[in-house]
Amino acid sequence: MRITPGRRESRNAIGLLDRDRHAAQRTKLVATGVSAVGDRRGIKGTVEPPTTTALTSASRRSLRSMKYVASSTAEIPPDRVNSASWTALRQALFMVSDRMLMRWMVHYRMPILPIHDPLHHPTTWPDRRLAVAPMMGCTDRHFRVLARVLAPNCLLYTEMVTTGALTLGDPDRFLRHGTDAPCALQVGGNEPGALAQCAVLAEAAGYQEINLNAGCPSDRVQQGGIGACLMSSPRLVADALKAMRAHTSIPVTIKTRIGIDDADSFEHFRRFVDVAAGSGIDTFIVHARKAVLTGLSPKQNREIPPLRYDFVYRVKETYPELHFVLNGGLLSGKCSTIAATILHLESLDGIMIGRQAYADPMVLAELEYHIFGTSRPNRWGVLNEYRKYIEEEIQSGTPLRYMARHLLGFVQGLPGARRFRRYLSEHMFDPSSGIDVIDAALAESGVRPC
């Protein structure tokens, strides 16, 4: 027999949910599966959930995301179950109506429990003194394992993932990661709702930060109106950041340029920072070049526009309460030495290394030693640790090339490095290749990691 709550009880329950949705500081919804609820908040009996045919396509996308959240939180320790369950409910709030959500909550006996403020951000934030920049085609989950062995305290970033890939595609494919904490997920998008949805997924997947890309100048990114294009719409950026902060407890940050095209004055950059900071964020990662949106490739945009470190220094003086991490040209040009790079930490809150960290990963170990005081790892020991990881991934079905390609720069500067890279490049793409290819590359090249 189907039992439905009375009209007054339904109205009260939905009203309470709506109140909690807009005043989450006071109440937090916690889904606890099929545990007993009783008559909490006047809801009696059970209600059949809405049929699939009643769902919009947007609702179905939300449900697919909820399935990912549920699967990703299956092995979360007991002290994090409440937080994980909350993210699953908040995920549904974006695309499912209040009435429909309430019917699910009643049917699956999801209690509404008052606990701590869900918008409270943790007091322990990632140490930003040293970070590796998000780089497409480089900072995937495999490289981050290698980087973590080299630099235990370095803050790592994923490749940029678009909101569509997470909300409309397969989130597990893009969010999967292992022993890379602390790690930040970088997202690209311009819709506050979709970005907030990604923030929920990022926290559920175990990332320590979510970062909005407002600096990528590639043609594909421009077609979507995201990346560096966002610098022309600071109000939209502020709205997006505010929405992201409202739906996650992990830090929300932004990576940006100092300007775009002709809008490259310090005053323009200062105004952008001022408006974005109005969202409540306090950390800006700044690539100290402007982005030229027409006429330059992404590679040229990393090299041709002049570096303006003085912009970052001046904005830090203007807003000393905010945190600024410097990116662009570090370990090259005028900052070609480690000493010159670390010197920026005297005035700024962090440094972010890009291409140099990928071309010669051992530089991360050196920076880690100078900044955090950790001992320098043995290159052979690092390779053995990564080798174990490669073996595990191969056994799980991951082709060798996805892990081995990150070793092309690992022996940079050693005798035989070129022969090592050549052998590895010629053999790692064979579908039948195994860990023996790396051993053979070392033997053929004569490289002896020290």
Image (tube, helix red, strand yellow):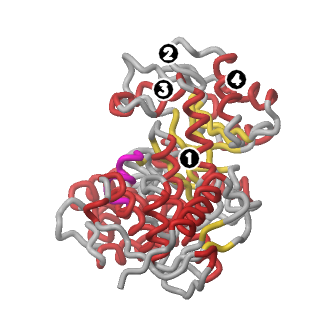
Tell me which label, 3 or 2, sits earlier in the chain: 2
Of labels 3 and 2, the one closer to you: 2
Circle 3 residue: 303
The amino acid type found where label 3 is placed reads: Glu
Chief secondary structure of the magenta portion: helix
Pointer 3: residues within 10 angstroms few (<14), some, or many (20+)?
Answer: some
Tell me which label, 2 or 1, sits earlier in the chain: 1
Of labels 3 and 1, the one closer to you: 1
Circle 1 residue: 211
- Whether residue 180 can be seen here: no
Q: Are marks 1 and 4 in contact (CB under 8 Å)?
A: no
Q: Is residue 448 above or below residue 389?
A: above
**Which secondary structure lies at badge 1?**
strand
All told, the count of numbered labels is 4
**Which secondary structure lies at badge 2?**
loop
Q: What segment is highlighted magenta in the picture?
A: 162-171
Distance from the alpha carbon under mark 2 to that under mark 1: 23 Å
Of labels 2 and 4, the one closer to you: 4
Q: Are marks 2 and 4 in contact (CB under 8 Å)?
A: no
**How far across and how far down the image is residue 220, in percent?**
33, 32
Residue ID at (64%, 34%): 335
Q: Is residue 261 above or below residue 337?
A: above
Left or right: residue 348 versus residue 404 is right
Pointer 1: residues within 10 angstroms few (<14), some, or many (20+)?
Answer: many
Left or right: residue 67 versus residue 207 is left
Tell me which label, 1 or 4, sits earlier in the chain: 1
